[in-house]
Image: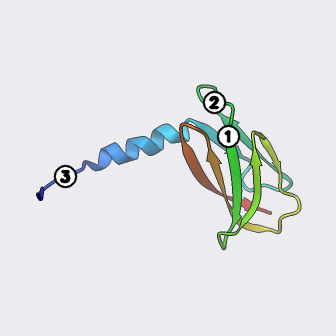
């Protein structure tokens, strides 16, 4: 069985990202010694954090910490992934 001519409206995809942006705050960006993570109180307090360098290599992994020490990482671009039971979000940040 084939089904043709299925159209997914683009607006439904953009609404997902707008909702996720309200769930988590990662700051400061650019960072120097520490990066802070604030998660909306509507979500479980258990979360995992992974930080990757620009090559995709995991350089930090931790759980349930709102402040991450990054002073030992060299300057450059990094990606931080925050995962809870309800959502996962990856953001880019810089270290000076």
Q: Residue at x 54, y 41 (%)?
A: 87
As drawn, the label of residue 86 is none
Mark 1, secondary structure of its residue = loop
The x and y percentages for residue 9 are 25, 48
The x and y percentages for residue 7 are 19, 52
Mark 3, secondary structure of its residue = loop
Q: Name the residue under label 3.
A: 7
Q: Residue furthest front?
A: 1
Residue 54 against residue 88 in the figure, above or below:
below
Q: Name the residue under label 2.
A: 44
Q: Which residue is drawn at 47% across and 37% down?
A: 19
Q: Residue at x 56, y 46 (%)?
A: 88
Badge 3 density bin: few <14, some 14–19, many ≥20, Cα 10 Å? few
As drawn, the label of residue 47 is 1
* Disc 1 and disc 2 in contact, CB within 8 angstroms: yes
Q: Which residue is drawn at 63% across and 30% down?
A: 44
């Amino acid at each position: 069985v084939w089904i043709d001519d299925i159209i997914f409206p683009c607006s439904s995809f953009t609404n997902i990202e707008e909702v996720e942006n309200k769930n988590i705050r990662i700051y400061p960006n650019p960072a120097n010694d520490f990066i802070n993570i604030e998660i909306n109180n509507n979500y479980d307090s258990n979360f995992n954090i992974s930080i990757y360098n620009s090559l995709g290599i995991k350089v930090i992994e931790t759980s349930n910490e709102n402040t991450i020490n990054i002073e030992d990482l060299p300057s450059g671009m990094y990606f931080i992934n925050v995962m809870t039971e309800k959502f996962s979000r990856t953001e880019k940040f810089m270290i000076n």
